[in-house]
């Protein structure tokens, strides 16, 4: 029996993309939490200077990635998704390694800008899996590939913290570069893509939007992706402060806060494949609306808990609910977008998420500072619940029991 029958190509691609996403995100988060400490080693001593440069270094990657993601999506549609995976993994490996050699804060910021310009492994994985997986399994597959990056984000800070104590921060950057290079080798050697390069000129923006079944709904998915990302991380600037208030002491605050944040990610890893199967069976619109509603409802009590373990429990519930959000968004987009434009559209979706990564912590910190931490949870919940209402209205207008209309079969100019 042929090997491809026992282990279909799309399943092998899914496994490698999962592992590549895990390795890449673990590598990235190995160094992110320790950038302030690294800046101190680079000669910054005033706390205000460290905070300012750290904010710029964090934001630089997300800002640049939000700008260039549509460009990489366009090139993925034109030249293939595997090439984008190779580009992202190799580029991130080289730049992360170089970060271990910097001698000035501005060197680090410049490399963080370049990191945003070449990143995008997870979004390219999403496009590859969406186009190579049978449609009846796409919801589950898109959910599974998402869990790889989330699991890597859980492991990365723990591994980075351990290595920084053992080998020092500079060598952690080198180790991270080597780890991401392993992802490059796996991607280049094992992923197989069925891709026919288009000999026509790339589609213009008008042609891309003209090829989409319901462009206003796809635009709504961009907004939804940004809102859910912003809502998920809006607590991060104040989680340590909140945990300290709940504990009533300063002992083990960092450890408990880390467990609280990790609880949501762990729940997402557990629930995402299950909700992905529900998306395949009942339609992504139903899963998306219900996930937004439940995620919003689980946020409200988080602002009025009295113990840290209660906060962790509610964050776990939030993670269970939010596990269905991104896979459902990706499934909706796939159902409305022809394959030759899918990379570009997923690039826009990724830009929405990056903007959410930028806006969430900033707005969360401002709301908590002016109106208190409970109000932060309440306002975030209301935004997600309002988004759930919009999804319910749109789903009610779509025929077929909550399933989006199929992509039009008519071709566009240049296709």
Image (spheres, rainbow, N blue to C red):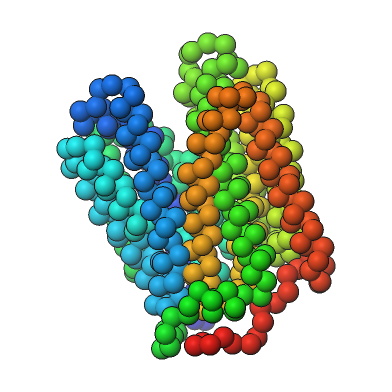
Q: How many numbered discs sit on the rendered protein?
A: 0
Where is 285 relative to 150, above or below?
below
Would residue 200 be seen by someone viewing this image from the given angle? yes
Residue ID at (41%, 55%):
65
Where is 99 relative to 218, above or below?
above
Residue ID at (28%, 39%):
172
Instruction: Estimate the x, y position of residue 367 in percent, counting from the top left.
Output: 58, 30
Residue ID at (34%, 69%):
189
Instruction: Estimate the x, y position of residue 103 in percent, counting from the top left.
Output: 17, 37
Instruction: Estimate the x, y position of residue 34 in percent, counting from the top left.
Output: 34, 33
Residue 203 relative to residue 93: left or right: right
Residue ID at (28%, 21%):
46
Residue 265 relative to residue 199: left or right: right
- Nearer to me, 411 or 34: 411
- Nearer to me, 173 or 210: 210
- Nearer to me, 78 or 314: 78
Where is 244 relative to 350, above or below?
above
Q: Quadrant of residue 409?
A: bottom right
Q: Quadrant of residue 155?
A: top left
The residue most toward the top is 249
- Nearer to me, 264 or 5: 264
Residue 388 relative to residue 322: left or right: right
Instruction: Estimate the x, y position of residue 368 in percent, counting from the top left.
Output: 58, 27
Would residue 190 be seen by someone viewing this image from the given angle? no
């Amino acid at each position: 029996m042929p090997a491809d029958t026992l282990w279909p190509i799309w399943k092998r691609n899914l496994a490698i993309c999962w592992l590549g996403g895990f390795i890449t995100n673990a590598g990235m988060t190995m160094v992110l939490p320790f950038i302030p400490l690294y800046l101190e080693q680079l000669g910054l001593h005033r706390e205000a200077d460290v905070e300012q440069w750290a904010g710029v270094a964090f934001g630089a990657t997300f800002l640049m990635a939000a700008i260039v993601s549509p460009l990489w999506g366009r090139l993925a549609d034109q030249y293939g998704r595997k090439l984008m995976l190779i580009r992202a993994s190799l580029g991130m490996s080289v730049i992360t390694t170089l970060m271990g050699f910097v001698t000035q804060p501005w060197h680090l910021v410049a490399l963080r800008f370049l990191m945003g310009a070449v990143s995008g492994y997870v979004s390219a994985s999403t496009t590859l899996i969406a186009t190579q997986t049978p449609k009846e399994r796409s919801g589950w597959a898109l959910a599974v590939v998402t869990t790889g990056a989330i699991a890597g984000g859980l492991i990365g800070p723990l591994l980075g913290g351990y290595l920084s104590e053992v080998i020092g921060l500079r060598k952690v950057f080198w180790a991270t570069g080597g780890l991401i290079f392993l992802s490059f080798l796996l991607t280049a050697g094992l992923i197989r893509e069925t891709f026919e390069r288009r000999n026509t000129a790339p589609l213009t923006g008008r042609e891309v939007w003209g090829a989409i079944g319901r462009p206003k709904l796809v635009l709504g998915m961009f907004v939804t992706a940004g809102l859910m990302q912003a809502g998920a991380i809006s607590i991060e600037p104040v989680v340590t402060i909140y945990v300290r208030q709940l504990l009533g002491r300063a002992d083990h605050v960092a450890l408990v806060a880390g467990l609280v944040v990790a609880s949501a990610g762990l729940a997402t890893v557990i629930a995402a494949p299950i909700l992905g199967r529900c998306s395949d069976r009942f339609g992504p619109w139903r899963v998306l609306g219900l996930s937004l509603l439940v995620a919003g409802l689980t946020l409200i009590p988080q602002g009025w808990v009295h113990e840290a373990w209660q906060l962790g429990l509610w964050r776990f519930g939030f993670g269970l609910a939010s596990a269905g959000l991104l896979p459902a968004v990706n499934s909706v987009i796939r159902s409305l977008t022809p394959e030759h434009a899918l990379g570009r559209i997923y690039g826009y979706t990724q830009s929405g998420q990056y903007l959410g990564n930028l806006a969430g912590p900033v707005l969360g910190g401002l709301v908590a500072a002016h109106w208190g931490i409970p109000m932060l949870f309440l306002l975030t919940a209301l935004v997600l619940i309002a988004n759930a209402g919009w999804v319910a209205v749109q789903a009610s207008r779509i025929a077929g029991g909550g399933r989006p209309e199929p992509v039009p079969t008519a071709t566009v100019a240049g296709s």
